[in-house]
Amino acid sequence: MPSPSLQMPARPTGARIVAMGHYQPDQVVTNDDLVARGVDSNDEWIQSRVGIAERRFATTESVVDMAEGAASKAIANSGISVGEFDLVILATCTMLYPVPGGAAELASRLGINAPGAYDLNAACAGFAYAVNAASNAILTGQAHTVLVVGAEKLSDWIDYNDRTACIIFADGAGAAVITASDEMAIGPVVWGSSGENYGAITTNPDTHALIQDGQAVYRWATSTIADVGRQACEAAGVKPTDLAAFVPHQANLRIIELVAKKLGITGEGSKTAIARDIVTAGNTSSASIPLALSKMLERGEIPSGEPVLMIGFGAGLTYAGQVILAP
């Protein structure tokens, strides 16, 4: 007797992001505010090193609180009923405790009944990994409507005596609603890792504070990420010069500018809008891409249906990039 074959659900043609939303806490923390807290630095040094003028810190909000704020806005923008969602993915690396994850609680708060729900930790590349996971779930027929959220409360993991790290990190959340589509609007992911450099961004086991070798990360990112962007564009069938927007992880303004220059999307005649949200939002890890992208869409800086390159990279060292069509 032949072995039975397993039945698979019907598979759609493609997947697309149909709406975005974002949330930032109210407390604005300037560079001068950090100095007043005892950080051995000054505004000029911080802006020249990383490009950050201010950031937001959550005082009462948790990771899930901020995720809920961004997700509620994305769902409202999508016009889709919460009853239609069948999968929730929360990209985060700053939950205070490893168990339980935040995705199921987030779904419950939003009124999404019994979806698949899990947290994903790829640090600053988390949102890009989560978008790929959502797209794959849809393309294999395992889900139809997916909520993807990147949310971080990095202020819980800051040592103010370490000026190389505490000046960078911040809090916030961004969310995307992803659905089945008649066209492919989320391109193939180009991902990888440099695990031999895992110690470049880590956590102090005694204080639980984030530690970063900024120079090592800078050298790695500026020598690696532009190639990832070119490969993601090639995989999606577009040229970098076709891009309406470039939205990389907001790690460091100097990294963003140099990678954009290597991609050939800067200068006179370029039509590519480049996300520089780090200047006022800081580095929000897995939240930084959806936070920046949501703001750009809200301001009308990216035409609907135009190609956008997203690249996440960070601790691990992991990276992932893909081209999407703007909602």
Image (cartoon, rainbow, N blue to C red):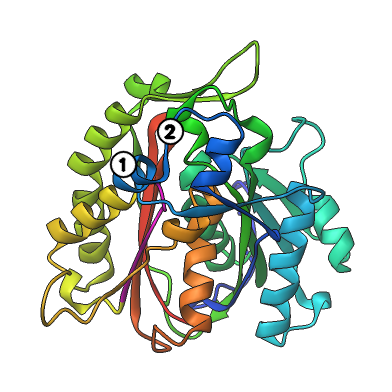
Q: As drawn, is 124 to the left or to the right of 171?
A: left
Q: Nearer the viewer, residue 277 or 3?
A: 277
Indicate the amino acid at tag 2. Answer: Ser
Crowdedness of circle 1 by 10 Å Cα count: few (<14), some, many (20+)? some
Crowdedness of circle 2 by 10 Å Cα count: few (<14), some, many (20+)? some
In the depicted structure, whether residue 56 falls above or below residue 195: below
Q: Nearer the viewer, residue 219 or 44?
A: 44
- Per the rendered image, the range of residues in magenta is 245-251
Q: As drawn, is 271 to the left or to the right of 41?
A: left
Residue 309 placed where, x, y %? 33, 66
Indicate the amino acid at tag 1. Answer: Arg
Q: Nearer the viewer, residue 321 or 188?
A: 321
Residue behind mark 2:
41
User: Residue at horizontal 73%, vertical 82%?
Assistant: 76
Residue 314 placed where, x, y %? 41, 39
Q: Is residue 126 magenta?
A: no
User: Residue at horizontal 38%, vertical 42%?
Assistant: 46
Callout 2: SS: loop
Residue 90 placed where, x, y %? 67, 52
Location of residue 174 (image quadrant): bottom right
User: Residue at horizontal 21%, vertical 82%?
Assistant: 271
Residue behind mark 1:
49
Q: Is residue 249 magenta?
A: yes
Q: Nearer the viewer, residue 124 or 142?
A: 124
Location of residue 106 (image quadrant): bottom right
| Residue 132 seen from this side | no
